[in-house]
Image (spheres, rainbow, N blue to C red):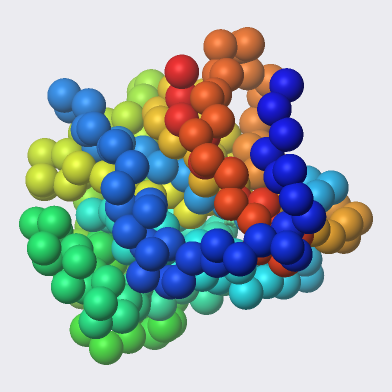
């Protein structure tokens, strides 16, 4: 048993600047697999496990979470999210400060990560923020998705077609999607949820790292837990790598064993 905070957090004076925070996360080891990228999942939850308040996550975690969120977003080659999250959170093109862009370029990455949206119904609105200002996200979908929707979205996005894992199913084989991103040269994928997408990735053993912010707040409600789906076999244990704290919110970093 180890006491991580021997002093009251308010007495600590070792606060990290935004740049130091980004450097800290960028220094972590994230080796890609032979045929797929390293997959890092980032989520914020309330102390009682809620992932959303009034349907969005923005009310959770406060300023500290926004800072860690930005630092973590500076890491990947691709940010991946399910269409539920993209619509609920009104996603637009990823943005990055000049400093973070420069650090990415110095590491051999593109200045801004690509955004990959997983969807099979393809109900995304081509007029939405997601496609503004010539931003072309990757739409990860399967041949079972509606042909007319696919054609419409192909005008504003790069459509990545991935077969379902099994013939009788409709959803994208997420392992194959990650392999396709790897073939495009992407080595680190940040998954930003939501719980439905997380659930499938975890069930397939495709999450290498979890960054979880635990907000010092109890919110109740009926939002999903951060992983939705059937109970998992007991071999998904993790190794705790880091604990940060800001205003009572904890920022945990775990890697898969
Ligand atoms: N607290 C946090 O950190 C956090 C993070 C993210 C999201 N959230 C919250 O979580 C909620 C959204 O999460 P959610 O679980 O409802 O949705 P989600 O996981 O974001 O998206 C689910 C959708 O993604 C698509 N999808 C998932 N797997 C697929 C596959 N294998 N093949 C094809 N399409 C696939 C489907 O889209 P189609 O229906 O278009 O086919 C599915 O309906 C929101 O309230 C959001 O605010 C919280």
Foreground: 243 or 219?
A: 243
Q: Residue at position x 13%, y 56% from top?
A: 107
Foreground: 166 or 19?
A: 19
> x, y percentage for residue 208?
40, 31
Foreground: 141 or 237?
A: 237
> x, y percentage for residue 159?
23, 57
176 sits to left or right of 102: right
Inspect this view and state whether residue 29 appears: yes
Foreground: 69 or 151?
A: 69
Instruction: Give above or below for 39 relative to 191.
Output: above
Q: Residue at position x 38%, y 22% from top?
A: 166
Inspect this view and state whether residue 200 appears: no
Can you tell which quarter of the image residue 204 is in? top left
Instruction: Give above or below for 201 relative to 135.
Output: above
87 sits to left or right of 159: right
244 sits to left or right of 54: left
Instruction: Give above or below for 140 relative to 156.
Output: above
Q: Residue at position x 41%, y 42% from top?
A: 40
Q: Residue at position x 40%, y 77% from top?
A: 92
> x, y percentage for residue 127?
39, 84
* Image quadrant in which the N terminus is located: top right
Furthest residue toward bottom: 133
> x, y percentage for residue 170?
43, 36
């Amino acid at each position: 048993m180890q006491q991580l905070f021997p002093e009251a957090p308010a007495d600590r004076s070792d606060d990290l600047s935004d740049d130091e925070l980004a450097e800290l996360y960028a220094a972590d080891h994230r080796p890609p697999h032979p045929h797929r990228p390293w997959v890092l999942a980032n989520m914020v939850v309330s102390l009682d496990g809620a992932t959303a308040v009034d349907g969005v996550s923005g009310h959770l975690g406060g300023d500290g979470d926004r800072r860690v969120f930005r630092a973590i977003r500076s890491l990947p080659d691709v940010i991946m999210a399910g269409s539920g999250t993209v619509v609920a959170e009104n996603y637009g093109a990823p943005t990055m400060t000049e400093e973070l862009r420069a650090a990415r370029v110095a590491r051999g990455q593109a200045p801004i990560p690509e955004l990959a949206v997983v969807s099979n119904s393809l109900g995304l609105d081509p007029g939405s923020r997601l496609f503004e200002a010539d931003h072309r996200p990757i739409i990860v979908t399967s041949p079972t998705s509606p042909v007319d929707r696919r054609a419409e979205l192909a005008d504003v996005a790069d459509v990545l077609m991935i077969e379902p894992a099994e013939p009788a199913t409709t959803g994208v084989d997420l392992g194959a999607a990650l392999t396709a991103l790897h073939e495009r040269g992407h080595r680190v994928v940040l998954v930003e949820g939501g719980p439905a997408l997380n659930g499938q990735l975890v069930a397939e053993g495709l999450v290498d790292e979890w960054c979880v912010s635990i907000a010092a707040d109890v919110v109740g409600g009926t939002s999903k837990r951060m992983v939705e789906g059937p109970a998992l076999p007991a071999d998904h244990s993790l190794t705790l790598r880091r604990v940060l704290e800001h205003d009572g919110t904890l920022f945990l970093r775990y890697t898969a064993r």
